Amino acid sequence: MSQLKDAILSVTASGDKAFIPYIMAGDGGLEKLKPIILRLQELGVTAIEVGIPFTDPVADGPTIERAGERALASGTTLRKVIETLTSFADEITVPLVAMTYLNPILAYGVEQFAADASVAGIRGLIIPDMPLEESEVVHPALTAAEISLVQLVSLTSTPERMERLTKASEGFIYAVTVNGITGARSSFANELEAHFKKIQSYTDTPVLAGFGISTATHVKDFGSFCSGVIVGSKIVDSLVAEDWEAIEELVKASKLAANEVGI
Amino acid sequence: MTTGVKGRFGRFGGQFVPETLMTALQELDEAYDKVKNDEAFQEELHYYLKNYVGRETPLYFAERLTKECGGAKIYLKREDLNHTGAHKINNALGQALLAKRMGKKKIVAETGAGQHGVATATACALLNLECIVYMGAEDVKRQALNVFRMELLGTKVVAVEKGSATLKDAVNEALRHWVTNIDDTHYILGSAMGPHPFPTIVRDFQRVIGDETRAQILETENRLPDAIVACIGGGSNSIGMFYPFVEDKDVALHGVEAAGKGIETGKHAAAIYSGQTGVLHGAFMYLLQDEDGFVQEAHSISAGLDYPGVGPEHCHLHDIGRATYGNVTDEEALEGLKLLCRTEGILPALESAHAVYYASKLVKTMAPDDILVICLSGRGDKDVHTISEALGGDLA
């Protein structure tokens, strides 16, 4: 069973859409991690994606890359993030999804990482530089620690590959909405809806959209044909600006059930 | 780390890339499989290598260098005489032709010393492809001449200010560019590194160095050499030189990493020497990193060796003991450079000077009728400012 998947399904069962904000751990100092996570869960997010900074973040766009540089400059490491999360794990009520490049996990030790991450409240893991073909490096240890390994499906994935990724993905399917790296963009192709329906047809695991979602309209638009969204760069920017109103607005846009009754 | 399906050299290599790149890599793999055994493609490549690049390059007996060093006979494989001044053109041309076959109109590449960038810009001008090259801002400064050459050739050069602003950061940006423009763009990776199938493709396009050397030494000496020495950044000239000799167990293979300011200072690029393994730029390999798995900056006077990892096939040759990997400091490389200038009238690239210095010591341990071949991977014209500065001159 996947706690992460259950959390998303219980949100969608109520008529709402899943909302997963991405934060860069250590951006502004690791002491901010606890208050940010507690406030986000208070706002009613479904889960929280916790980014771990890396020296060579090839899958990230400028916003998250810069956040990573700030986090690295403040001394953030995978080990310190896990220690910090563990220190208030009993207050964490939503599943955490760690996003880290592979090498810090290898340096930590795969088994030790999985065990420690589980204690820290991490229920899902995204490794942006590890495609399905290479995932046996970490998968057995993650399974033992009940951490869901989330697969990304991109617009460039062939139909055959899309099906394989979709079936292998645990927790949810991270559907990349654009070719390229993370970051805010203004327009989305109409073909996306068909793309998402195709992905969802392979599985009952929820499909979430990510990369470039930055407005309440995006959240609603994507919500109309998938199970929810992941918002990265926009959240990172808003946290730097301490603009919690913007974050609240995005989260509200995912509460479709509430919206319908006119609140 | 032996679980991946594709492109493994023992426990090294693999395809550690974002999902967005997987389809492109598969496409590249299939396209390359086709042209590998396609006579028309190989003929076209051979035509350009012969008539445009100027192959084959000489295998030259360095008589005065041999006497000065006092030991085995030293031959130089003159890759410095290639069009554009280094071995990089072998691969750039091969991949540019491959890109044309794949119907890609645009090329992205990274460059360290600028030799691969110049080679790629050249191949793109020749074959009418649009080209963009990412280069660390630090290297843009060190290699201003090559930047200017690329621009003359119609290539757009983008300086990368991020990270250490050297080769690894240029690779990051080139990968990002490729991910974002995957539909019409081919990435011409310049070294025998990165995700499968790049290490294999680059090796195959560079093996012409070793194939020629083998035929040439058999013709002049009627036997194979006792030792071969080549420098290693990512490892393309060396793997191209080594590969045709791997099965010849009596030929000792020596790779030379950059020891920078000295191994003990921590400011070096000797990834194999470090003994640490990790994943960067799509491959599992020996990698300079700290205890948290963060990639460390490499240091070398030569921009082309200034890379924290090393190609996966070299990692494997090291693991199985088939090749020996040593290292040479900045200062020693400069000594090797001066030695070759003085004795043979050849100004080597700073990269190649590492191999020259290493060989000058190795021959002393060998018998006078033994044979050693140095892969002289490039010429040093591009380095005159750096050399002048290092020797206390005031050229810049």
Image (cartoon, coloured by chain):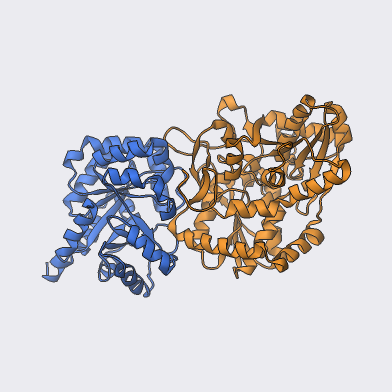
Chain colours: A blue, B orange
Quadrant of the rendered image containing residue B69: top right
B274 versus B352 height, above or below: above
Residue B17 locus on image (x, y percent): 47, 53
Count of numbered badges drawn on the protein: 0
- Front position in the image: B306 or B217: B217
Judge from the rendering whether residue B237 lies leftward or rightward of residue B187; answer left or right: right
Residue A59 locus on image (x, y percent): 44, 53
Quadrant (top left/top right/bottom left/bottom right) for the C terminus of chain A: bottom left
Q: Report if residue B110 is visible in the image.
A: no
- Front position in the image: B333 or A247: B333
Judge from the rendering whether residue A27 lies leftward or rightward of residue B178; answer left or right: left
B181 versus A79 height, above or below: below
Residue B272 locus on image (x, y percent): 58, 35
Residue at 37%, 39% in the rendered image: A110
Residue at 51%, 53% in the rendered image: B6
A233 versus A179 height, above or below: above
Residue B358 locus on image (x, y percent): 72, 31
Q: Report if residue A181 is visible in the image.
A: yes
Quadrant of the rendered image containing residue B239: top right
Quadrant of the rendered image containing residue B340: top right
